[in-house]
Amino acid sequence: MKALITGSAGFVGQHLAEHLSNEGDEVFCSDLSLGGPDLLDPAGINDLVSRIRPDHVYHLAGQADVKASWEDPLTTFRVNAEGTLNVLLACQLFKVKKVLCVSSAEVYGSVQKSELPITEKHELNPSNPYATSKSAAEILCKQMGSPNFEIMRARSFNHFGPGQKENFVVAALTKRMLQAKQRGESEITVGNLKTIRDFTDVRDVVRAYRLILTKGEGGNAYNVCSGIGRKIQDLATALLSQIDSELDLKVDPNLYRPADTPVLIGDYSKLQKQTGWEPRIEFDQTIKDTIESTKALIAQNR
């Protein structure tokens, strides 16, 4: 099976490439940082797909930083919505059988406690520019899919694990805690610790992505999550425990994200029913692997 990954040099893309290869797929990688075409270059995207002629495309590339989306909402929208359209048009033109477009649980926006855990039937209610761009991309996926051109959507909740960049909460906390311990510091400043999120190991996430394309149904969206909500405070406590540090966490409201969604917890029963997927890697194991990976990155001055 020929599989093309856009955004292959990113955190999830690298793990996905490894997983697909281990499953026996012939993997082709594309990333702007590796000389691949820009998502806003239709001719470049067409050339990429026409040369490879993949059976499956995993579309991961895009602007994934919520904070950056507030700073430049137009670029975020163009890259995530228009860029997705360019990928879909190329796939349609060159007869790709199946496409997985990776969306985000951010599309659900703020929800009431009575609505938790969130299922795929919940309305899209984006509350930041990033989520809006992903919602628009999802609409394009629904419009362009057909029996001969199956497009699935993965609504990924928070995922973490070894190799994640520090512009995401777990990686950022891990690196700052380790560096503070090395320097003998007694505290670090942090953002909102009361936020509740649903965390899944990235290695479980990429396993879900392949199962969605091989066993899922075209036109459908699938939550990829653990079904367990954890406060960022609990996450920080788990990190401190495994790092063996007694750092104080000083909350700074200036570090809060604009319009942050208080609680996001998903329901993966649809994914489980149709593909058999469920998370396998324990939360504490992912914490341990993330710490070891971050230590290695710090040692390399990265």
Image (spheres, rainbow, N blue to C red):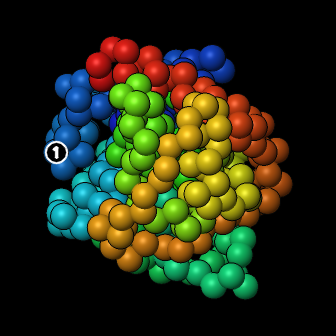
Q: In which quarter of the image is the N terminus?
A: top right
Q: Is mark 1 on a helix, strand or loop?
A: loop
Res 82 quadrant in image: bottom left
Q: In this view, does 235 lie above or below 258?
A: above
Q: How many labels does the image show?
A: 1
User: What's the residue type where badge 1 is placed?
Assistant: Asp
Name the one closer to the observer, 244 or 28.
Answer: 244
Query: Residue 261: horizontal and vertical position, in percent?
Result: 49, 73
- Within 10 Å of disc 1 (Cα), the crowding (few <14, some 14-19, many 20+) is few
Query: Residue 4: horizontal and vertical position, in percent?
Result: 43, 30
Q: Name the residue: 38% across, 77% down.
A: 259
Q: Is residue 252 above or below residue 11?
A: below
Res 49 quadrant in image: top left
The answer to whether any part of residue 230 appears in the image is yes
The answer to whether any part of residue 81 appears in the image is no
Q: In this view, does 57 lie above or below 117?
A: above
Res 278 quadrant in image: top right
Q: Name the residue: 50% across, 23% down.
A: 293
Q: Name the residue: 66% across, 65% down.
A: 265
Name the one closer to the observer, 171 or 217.
Answer: 171
Query: Residue 252: horizontal and vertical position, in percent?
Result: 36, 64
Name the one closer to the observer, 302 or 181.
Answer: 181
Query: Residue 222: horizontal and vertical position, in percent?
Result: 64, 58
- Would you name the residue on which mark 1 appears? 41
Q: Name the residue: 17% across, 63% down.
A: 72
